[in-house]
Amino acid sequence: MEITGIDAAVEALLAPVASAVSKLVFYAVPVGNSELPLIVLWLAAAALYFTIYLRFINFRALWLAIRHVRGDFSDPEAKGEISHFKAVATAVSGTVGVGNIGGVAVAISMGGPGATFWLLVAGVLSMSTKLVECTLGVKYRRQNADGSVSGGPMYYLEHWFQRKRWPRTGRLMGGFYALALVIAGFGIGNMFQANQAYTQFLVITGGDSSWLSDRGWFFGLVLATVVALVVIGGIRSIARVTVVLVPFMAGLYIISALAVIALSAEHIPAALRMVMEGAFTSQGATGGALGAMVIGFQRALFSNEAGLGSASIAHSAVQTDEPASEGITALLEPFIDTVIILSLSSLVILTSAIPNGLMTAEVAGIELTSAAFAVHFEFAPYIIALAALLFAFSSLLAWSYYGLKGWTYLFGESRIVQLCFQMLFCTFIVIGCMLQLVAVLDFSDAMIFVIAIPNLIALYLFAPEVRDDITRYIQKLRDQGRY
């Protein structure tokens, strides 16, 4: 889209601010021949710390997490609104997006095949971070008068400082998190997703020749209406949709990826060799092995959002009286998003795109992934477009809830306040399909990562408490003969 008219006016107004904020949040230091954004180091260090501090809980409790999702420990009498499975589905819908399809291609283009190895390592480590924040999300959630619950970093941040008799500081920290979350929700969680949904729908319906090619407003209006019908019903309505949508879209993509990898099976040994050589040597990456590590960690952490605290908002609505149970369940979120889906995307590119010479400077991102699938299936671009469309739609649903909880933290839980946000959110969907506001997206992208700073501080402060909760819960299951 060409940036003209109102797009250009908004860009001119916000671009300097967005650029300054983005440079601050994503400030990078030279590391060898590569650059390391400090926010990535902040997230990666936490993932490693919590993995060690919790004695590799990401490995020890993975099967227990699966048992929670399938309902082995469900308690219909417990407080909350949705099941463990629905909580995971809603949170996954917010993290699995277009980046899972196209972001890997960019990571491999920049960091070489070795980036895939570090992407996998980062995904495994970040499972521990997700456990800590989701345990706290449930433990310090609030029960509202209408039976709904509100939880997330703003609540456990506030609680920590209130416990230290600094209530104003707690409210300020919670308010800062909530405000940044709302801003991020309107940009990356809304306008970007809506624009991506529109773009992928055009691919399916004929591209520039599609009837909708110059009618973004119409697509946006239809999309906003569908989203409104779902989100106005709250987390229970959102969960009813995501519990069907997430398995379908993830299953569609995973089965398609496995089929492509199987048809390129002869290239798997060479692909694995390239990954290991690139991960630990200077071959094939900008900045060598260190560059591959930086880019791999960056892609994984930006994808699964472990350390940002956003997913804990969805997990806090779970029906349980044991906060640790949902923390353990949340281990599955980075496992699905990063360990499974991103790894499969990587293998598709390594076994199909690279052997066929498809990786060039002109072809990157989702186009490269689509071309890799098309090596074996001519209709693959339509599958990729459909998957990307569904990923974008599901992200809209999840972020509508994240943004709503930030909004109600700031302005109250009344029904009118909630409807005002939901109407505003749906209006931004239409705008996202009509305009290309790069500055708005850059600014909101920076906001979503700036919230990692107060959130991770809280996670460190609460770490001993979370470890005690996890240990006590697992011991309780052992005493009952259920673990």
Image (tube, rainbow, N blue to C red):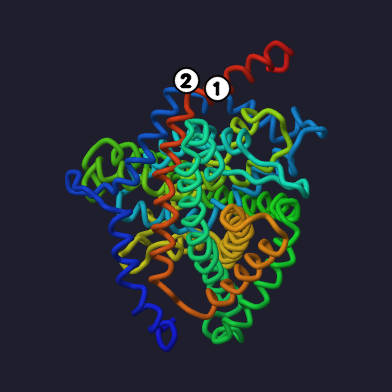
Query: Picture coordinates of residue 240 (x, y %)?
Result: 75, 52
112 vs 45: above or below: below
Kindly state the secondary structure of the residue where label 2 is placed: loop
Question: Looking at the image, which residue is at 75% across and 28% down?
Answer: 72
Q: Farthest right residue? A: 77
Asked whether, in this view, residue 335 is left or right of residue 252, the answer is left
Asked whether, in this view, residue 220 is left or right of residue 183, the answer is right
Query: Picture coordinates of residue 443 (x, y %)?
Result: 39, 64
Asked whether, in this view, residue 262 is left or right of residue 447, the answer is right
Cα separation, mark 1 vs mark 2, equals 8 Å
250 vs 325: above or below: below
Asked whether, in this view, residue 96 is left or right of residue 148, the answer is left
Question: Looking at the image, which residue is at 25% across and 41% down?
Answer: 290
User: Of the residues shown, which amino acid type is indicated by label 1?
Assistant: Arg
Question: Looking at the image, which residue is at 61% across and 17% down?
Answer: 472
| Marks 1 & 2, CB-CB < 8 Å contact | yes
**Residue 380 figure quarter:** bottom right
The residue that label 1 is drawn on is 60
Kindly state the secondary structure of the residue where label 1 is placed: helix
Q: Is residue 378 visible?
A: no
Which image quarter is the N terminus in? bottom left
Q: How many marks?
A: 2
Q: Is residue 367 visible?
A: yes
User: Of the residues shown, which amino acid type is indicated by label 2?
Assistant: Arg
Of the pair 213 and 304, the residue shown nearer to us: 304
Q: Farthest top residue? A: 479
Nearer the observer, disc 1 or disc 2? 2
**Residue 48 figure quarter:** top left
Disc 1 or 2, which lies upstream in sequence? Answer: 2
Which numbered marker is on residue 55? 2
Assess disc 2: are there few (<14), some (14-19) or many (≥20) residues with their C-alpha within 10 Å of its C-alpha: few
